[in-house]
Amino acid sequence: MKTSLAQPTVRPSDETPAIPLQMAPKRRGKPPRHFADLTPEERVASVIEAGEPAFRAKQLATHYFTHYTSDAAKMTDLPAKSRENLAATMFPELIRPTRKLEADGGTTVKTLWHLFDDAKVESVLMRYPNRTTLCVSSQAGCGMACPFCATGQLGLTRNLSTAEILEQVRAAFRSLADGEIPGGVTRLNNLVFMGMGEPLANYKAVMETVRALVAPQPEGLGMSARNITVSTVGLVPAMQKLTKEGIPVTLAVSLHAPDDDLRSELVPINTRWSVDETLDTARNYFEVTGRRVSIEYALIKDMNDHAWRADLLGEKLNARGRGWVHVNPIPLNPTPGSIWTASDREVEDEFVARLRGHGIPTTIRDTRGSDIDGACGQLAAEEDDE
Ligand code: SAH
């Protein structure tokens, strides 16, 4: 894509240089092909190619998507020779956990993963009384350059492959099935693409992941599309494409400001697709899929938290109809070195009250895991000396 984009001029601190928008990754090295990269048809073809009978594809799928295992040694219904043969070709180790951090009595777990080329990503598993949610990464780093976001400050390293994303999900299912999270054995209910990266900038792998998430077991993980949230800065053409996929995932749009002047500073891609274009596209997503869209709004003290901005947001949403959208304000999680901070409680309350006054359903998003840098926008994998 050819873009000539203005640089943001508002920055978290004067020492923080504005970083450029980056649509394409620096590194293009491809991770090894994995069973989870394949469609059901490709699984059969590749099992045959490995000299095994076609029905092994279903056996492998059952192990992977129903028992959440990629360890060939555990696939004891297969002959030992087939196990060895298939382990090497189908299940290379793609992601390796190198650090786990816990909060909330062990019900929030952040995992740092090392990838084959030493790129690093994070995922966060959160157990609530009535549901369990996993926040996954879709890219190593991110090219969208939002100045308040820790990942945005890293720049984009590369896209993750389908299997690198699915492996984060499988690991979560595995951990829940093993009873590793206090509260007993359970399954994963919700998945949000709110970890590192801009999911719609890695469209193909993210959609292949979604297809595997919603395919019934044993072909996939049997999740419900409505419980999968794809969160985007507002890549309009990709949102339009998503609208036509026929998979009614929940769409979340990171708006953060209702006016172009400020939004172009906070979400630099706004210089390419404006607030109005983004909202029109979101509204059309609702129209076609019937899924109510979420608007994400990080409340940043004295930056975007003014009552008039709540009113303007309410007006812009209502101008596009009723009942199609809800707003999720979240108090900013300050990133290291930033002079920006979360809005005061009264300001937050007023912002919410104004939106509700316009008839917009509004719920404050929780900041679980902020003490382990596992909350929204705080994921920034670091180089550790190990
Ligand atoms: N690239 C996607 C996913 C990013 S993370 C997107 O931008 O939507 C998910 C959400 O966390 C986004 O709404 C993002 O704007 C928000 N976020 C980023 N940094 C944050 C911070 N420091 N505090 C609160 N929310 C933040």
Image (cartoon, rainbow, N blue to C red):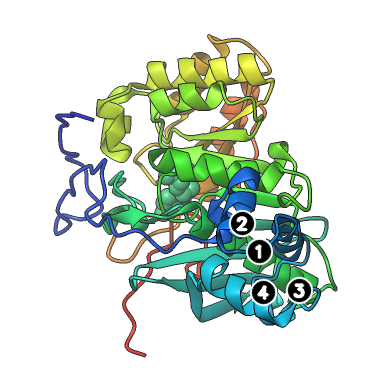
Q: Secondary structure at mark 4?
A: helix
Amino acid at pointer 1: Glu
Question: Could you give the CA–CA distance between mark 3 and mark 1, rounded to whole angstroms?
Answer: 11 Å
Name the N-terminal-most of marks 4 and 1.
Answer: 1
Residue 348 visible from this viewpoint: no
Relative to 22, say whether 136 is above or below. below
3D distance between C-alphas at marks 4 and 1: 7 Å
| Mark pair 4, 3: CA separation | 6 Å
Crowdedness near tag 1: few (<14), some (14–19) or many (≥20) residues, C-alpha within 10 Å = some
Give the secondary structure at mark 2: helix
> Relative to residue 340, is residue 285 drawn left or right?
right
Q: Quadrant of residue 169 in the image?
A: bottom right
In terms of sequence position, does the residue under pointer 2 or pointer 3 come before the other? 2
Residue holding disc 2:
48
- Compare residues 386 and 259 and report the one nearer the observer: 386
**Label 2 neighbourhood size at 10 Å, few (<14), some (14-19), many (20+)?**
some
Mark 2 vs 1: CB contact within 8 A: yes
Q: How would you rate the neighbour count of disc 4 (Cα within 10 Å): few for under 14, some for 14-19, many for 20 or more?
A: some
**Marker disc for residue 78:** 3
Task: Find residue 72 and report its horizontal and vertical position in percent.
Answer: 66, 76
Cβ atoms at labels 4 and 1 below 8 Å apart: yes
Q: Residues within 10 Å of mark 3 (few under 14, many from 20)?
A: some
Residue shown at the point (38%, 40%) measured from the top left: 201
Q: Nearer the viewer, residue 258 or 146?
A: 146
Q: Which residue is mark 1?
A: 52
Judged by depth in the image, the label closer to the viewer, 2 or 3, is: 2
Residue at 32% in and 55% down: 158
Foreground mark, 3 or 1, reads 1
The answer to which image quadrant residue 362 occupies is top right
Q: Which mark is residue 82?
A: 4
